[in-house]
Each structure stands twice: as structure tokens, then as C-alpha cells.
Amino acid sequence: MAPTPEEHPNKAAFLLRVRSALGRTEPIVHMPDHPSLKSNAMRQQEKVRTIVARNEARRSPTLDRLARTAAAASWNVRRAGDAEEAASIVAEIAQQSGVKNLVRSAEDVFKRVNIDTALRSVGVSPAILASGMSRSRGALRDMAFRADMGVTGVSYAIAETASCAVIPRKGVARLASLAPPRLILLIEPEQVLETLDDFFAVTRLNRMQARGRTANYFNFISGPSRTADIEQTLTIGVHGPGEVHMVILG
């Protein structure tokens, strides 16, 4: 049966009933005096400044903590003293794993860590997989799923949880870190944060400064992919890489 008009009062009558229920006789004319967005941004900037200074002061113990928590979370952790050693470690892992097809992202870290030359020296030719490339989306997808291994950088690494955040941006293709069964992440010292709170504070400031024109999601990688069914049977590597390596510079 169709509802009667009494069940659907007009807007003014509805709002009057709400005000009466709240004990108000008049509508609120003035909005609450919230701090301006500019003021919020300034406070957030000061907060992040403190976080950055703290992380710089504690860099060495924070890197050690990341290595410990990552090992406990089933990452294969390697430390590299410099970029050349990091590239050699990547080539060594690829060779030991019998990798034939390898994809990497096009992030700036690969300008500093020349893994391409190191990989070719062990017979592996890396293919670059990045958003915005001239290849079709389908071709990039096929490359990613044919690959035996993916190598990418990170946006941030969190020592507290051994989580690596990959935020979409130019040069980054999410498939490089999700599709291959093996994954290597290269982490530079300045990308390591102590806690998740630090991460969300930094990314909030980035979003405020970009006026919202930033990625609307990010990937957290906290170890090998784990999937469990209703019978609590754990399976590794179903929805992402089952073998993950973390190469920490510094």
C-alpha cells in the first residue's frame, strides 16, 4: 500500500520535528567556528617536521628495527652498504631463484641503484613496467603475469609493522608488486618511518599540500601474501607474491 502523505512530511515540517526532538526552538544559523584549513595545514606541517627530525636522529636503530620486524613477518631481509651492493644482491636473488622474466617499475630509485646492468650480468633481462607507458594496459598486464619476479621501490617503509607502502604515481605500476610470484623491494634510509602514525601524518600533509590531487589509495605489503579459508587453512601466495625480499640500503 502506498504511504500516506502524513508519513512523508515536507522538509520544513521534518526539520521542525528534529529540532523539537533535540530541544531546539530555532535552527542553527552560524556554523561552528572550526580552525581554517590553512591553520590545520600549518599545524600538520609542524607535526611532520618533528617526525622527520626524530626519524633522522634515530635512523640507524630504526633501520635495525625494520630488519628485525621484517624477518619476523617472513620477509627475506638483506642489508646493503651502498647502491652497488644493493644491485648485486638483487642479481644474486634473481640468479638463485632461476628467474628468466623479470619486471621492474620506473621509479627514481633505479637511477641510483643500477639493477639492470647487474641483472644482465647474470643472464636476466629486466622489462620496465610503469603506468603511462605506450603499451596497452592489456600488454602490461600480460608482462606482469608472465614474470617470475618483480622489483620495485617503495614510498615508505614502517619499522613498527614491517609494512611497505606503495603509493601510485608516475613510474609505478601496481602489477609489478602484485602479479609476479616473487617480489624484491628496495628501501632507502629516508623512506623508513618508525610507526604507522608517522606514515598517516606524512601522507595527510602531502594530501593537504596537493589539495586532494593525490592517489586515492595505497598498497600495504606486510610480507608474503596469506589467504585463509573458513576452515583456517592458510595458503601462501594466492593473492600476491608468496616470496618477498626486502633490500635495505644503509
Image: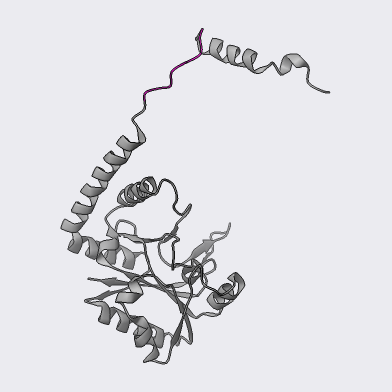
Seen at 36% across and 92% down, the residue is 121
Residue 146 is drawn in which quadrant? bottom right
Q: Position of residue 89 (x, y in %)?
A: 31, 81
Seen at 43% across and 18% down, the residue is 30
Q: Position of residue 187 (x, y in %)?
A: 31, 68
Q: In the displayed structure, does residue 93 sit left or right of residue 137?
A: left
Q: Position of residue 79 (x, y in %)?
A: 26, 74
Q: Nearer the viewer, residue 208 or 164?
A: 208
Colouring of the image: one colour
Seen at 64% across and 18% down, the residue is 11
Q: Indicate whether 203 appears above or below 150.
A: above
Q: In the displayed structure, does residue 234 sit left or right of residue 154?
A: right
Q: In the displayed structure, does residue 243 sit left or right of residue 43?
A: right
Q: Quadrant of the C terminus?
A: bottom left
- The magenta segment is 25-33
Q: Is residue 67 magenta?
A: no
Q: Nearer the viewer, residue 98 or 22?
A: 22
Q: Indicate whether 42 appears above or below 109.
A: above
Q: Is residue 29 magenta?
A: yes
Q: Position of residue 85 (x, y in %)?
A: 26, 81
Outermost residue, right side: 1
